[in-house]
Amino acid sequence: MTVATKVRPIIGLEIHVQLRTRTKLFCGCEVQTDAPPNSRVCGICLGHPGTLPVMNRVALESAALAGMALGCEIARFTKWDRKSYYYPDLPKNYQISQYDIPLAAGGTFEFDVDGSPREIRIRRAHLEEDAGKNIHDTPGCTLVDLNRTGTPLLEIVTEPDLASADDTYAFCVELQRLVRHLGVSEADMQKGHMRFEPNVNVAIEHNGREYRTPIAEVKNINSFKFVRQAISYEIERQVAVWEENNDYVIGKASNENRGWDADRGVTEFQRGKEAAHDYRYFPDPDLLPVQLSDETLGSIRAQLVERPVQRRRRFASEYGLSMKDAETIVEHRPTADLFDEVIKLGGPAEIAGKQFVNVWLKHANDRGVAVTELGVEAARIAELAKMTAEGTVNKTAANQLADAMLTRSNCPSALAKELGLVQVQDADATARWVDEAFAANQQAVSDARTNPKKMQAAIGFLRGQVMKLSGGKADPKLVGKLIEERLQQP
Amino acid sequence: MTTPLDIPVAEIAAGVRIGKLSALDIVSLALARVESLQPQLRAFISVDADRAMNLARKIDEQRAAGREIGALAGVPVAVKDNMCTTFGATTCGSKILAPFHAQEAAHVVDQLESAGAIVIGKTNLDEFAMGSSTENSAFFTTANPWDVSRVAGGSSGGSTAAVAARLIPGALGSDTGGSIREPASFCGIVGLKPTYGRVSRYGLVAYGSSLDQIGPIARTARDAALLLSVIAGHDPRDSTSANEPAPDYVAALDRPIRGLRIGVSEEYFGAGLNHEVQATVRAAIAAIESQGATVLPIHLPHMKYGIACYYLIATAEASSNLARFDGVHYGHRTPRPADIIDLYSSTRGEGFGAEVKRRIMLGTFALSSGYYDAYYLKALKVRTLIKSDFESAFRDVDVIASPVAPTIAFPIGEKSDDPLAMYLADIYTVSANLAGIPAISIPCGFDASGLPVGMQLMGNYFAEDRLLNIAHQYQQVTDWHNHMPALG
């Protein structure tokens, strides 16, 4: 047995993303995979003899948009090919896909892992129809639900540029953000809108030589967590197998397909790749080749929005948001759009960012709605942030104001006046409250002056007393300053 | 004796329109004649008499009520049984689809019936349109009305026999490599394969999707023009359907043909062509020349690769098109399969006939990895060469004249054990499918034994009007189309 000293994982992915279209890729059936079984089907998606496919232009344009966002070159000429294999959930026994001329190819995609930038090359992205579902839960028979048959799928193939399970996890999450941001997919993992097939092997350095284990393709994973687990498992498994047998390398052992068993947390051998399927691809004679004019490509490109990764980086660098807050806001495109609007309307970035996450997003989460659905417009959000930054209201008052803004459409300055939440900047008045608090709390004053152990707590207590006396309207900064000064005096 | 079935489509429709003829009478006559000749000819796979009579009654009622009736109102027609109908089964002449009932009618069936034509039934064919004699039908072989010991040709032999025997005045066939023209030639009638894309394939069960085209079968060019006018045109459900308006084919019939240039390629008159067929076709070309057309020699150098090219492309597409017949979702399913693989293989083993299996295997092979480039891809390249042969020929001539088939109708059984000899029956017809150009078969005489011979005219893309025009003018000076087979 050899012990591997230096191990470098090599990971690439195939990802299937279900595009968000009203109808299927080649027929007019509604895309609604959770409808009663076989209720969203027609002769075309059932492959009835005599029926013919007609391409869904919206699906093509969504796929092209996604391809552009992945940094790919979009083919001006592409076509449809038939991929032949027999399976009961594939009624025609061929899948309409794109073989040698993918819609999109040669891209680069950026993402961040814990704030540090990464890049992955995208080999290709093509459009194809999904198959139905075989359901094996009835003993003695297999049921087939063809609602999903013909649903448009974008298949994305990356280069093997990823070096760890964590990086792969981050990439998958970022890809979900991207397709959601573009609006081309709901990317709902629960509904199987994104399915991952990681290709994993490892390069092992040993005695100055590099050994590469055979590539394992882990099929059809539908959760980010499982992607990470399956890759970690594969890395360990492959290293262990190699340590037992140094001939476990490409060329001597065959690549294989494996399946992820989530219950046991292991991958399982499915089939060797030397017995690869012959799919007998050939151009589908029922469909015309697709030509994309510069004009069409231009109008698709016009729908391209800032990618979430860039947006997050911009929120951090331009607005000074923490990466965490930037991530939270950019998670949802309308939320990020709203935030950009708030800044544009003069919301001071730092306070606006904090308030957005801690106040507005919190309210939205509590109500189970998007922040854009709270009924509080960008202008009012910006104004509140500005009032807070300028000291017109303090933080506590700002929270109270926000509550009021949820149920009333008045501007926050009017509401602040009405509710008596405007911060008192009057130094004399504040000094009187400080005097009052000092007089009423001799023990605390003495602790603050002389007892190092209790000093901080005593100052905090005094500040609280002052705020209380002011009815919450005193400027905490001013209060702090006056307390400091007063403590210096005998 | 002249019955309404002996008069042309246009006259039947006109007669029904003015009330001189009753749709019900005509349809009843047709149904009776179909029934009495079915034992001899076996032209029909299914007939829906009740439906046909009900439709006929409705048309008579509409006319009586003064309502508008269509251009083909009351005309009994039939369609090849690879076109979907919502009545009866759509079998494709195959056991595997014997129990298949389509949910939607083919575009052409809708077009015919919305013009008032009455589809009385579905005609016999070689299984999945694969063949040149209808002997590959899983049900029975259609006989040639001129000699019932001979084949009607194929694969649209049921439609051509029915029209030739005056069971109906018009029918539809489909043509992938000659399946309208060769049986039309064998049966002494007119058969037109339109330009690829001229007629929607929606509802036509695919054999070779890039070659298949539906076309009219009738006794005269005028009737064929009338039928084509009804079925031609754009259909958004077929992506390969041409978005070109269909001209008035009937109006174009009377154009003069003086000065037209007829190309003749000696590649179509080489070895293997029956002498009598050759002489008859040459005489017909001379007749057109004497009507004022000019005959010019042309060269189609790649025509000789047509059969090889066709049998690779058509079978490759067929192997994929027929993959769906697996017993899982519809059609025949083997009883008690052991497992899913057995379900597939036994269903298909039982359901398909020998020729269909042969072509599926051939096509599967041609598309297999390692063979794709040498066979399928090479065939596509040859196809491009054949296409450009025609494109350059049509710079010099308006149409190209040739025989339709190398022989007259052959005896039933003569070639059924020799697939290669059978494939050669398509030698003059496949090129038009490969190039996608229109071509027509016109009756142009009889051999010494009294069997019909056809002449083929091939035209440039969308030149159906010109082909029908020449055929019509030829029929003005000849009476081959008025000969009638001696049947009961």
Image: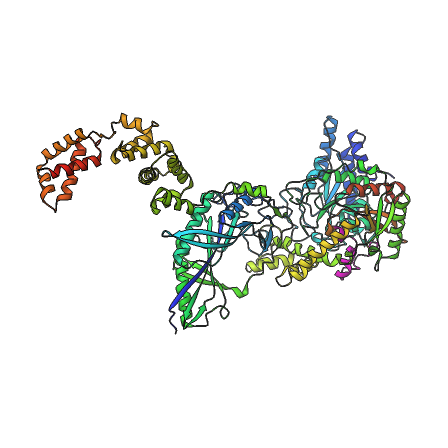
Q: Is residue B469 left or right of residue A264?
A: right
Q: Is residue B164 left or right of residue A489?
A: right
Q: Residue visible at 10% across and 36% down?
A: A441
Q: Residue visible at 70% across and 57% down?
A: B379
The x, y position of residue B68, in whole percent, is 72, 28
- Compared with residue B323, is residue B218 higher up or lower down, i.e. above or below? above
Q: Residue visible at 61% across and 62% down?
A: B369
Colour setup of the view: rainbow
Q: Is residue A24 visible?
A: no
Give the quarter of the image for residue B238.
top right
The x, y position of residue B56, in whole percent, is 73, 35
Q: Is residue B408 left or right of residue B127?
A: right
Q: Is residue A93 left or right of residue B131?
A: left
- Return the residue found at the far bottom: A1
The x, y position of residue B367, in whole percent, is 64, 59
User: Residue B417 lies in magenta, yes or no?
Assistant: yes
Magenta region:
B407-432
User: Residue A117 lies in magenta, yes or no?
Assistant: no
Q: Is residue B482 visible?
A: yes
Give the quarter of the image for residue B36.
top right
Q: In which quarter of the image is the N terminus of chain B?
A: top right
Closer to the camera in the image, A483 or B272:
A483
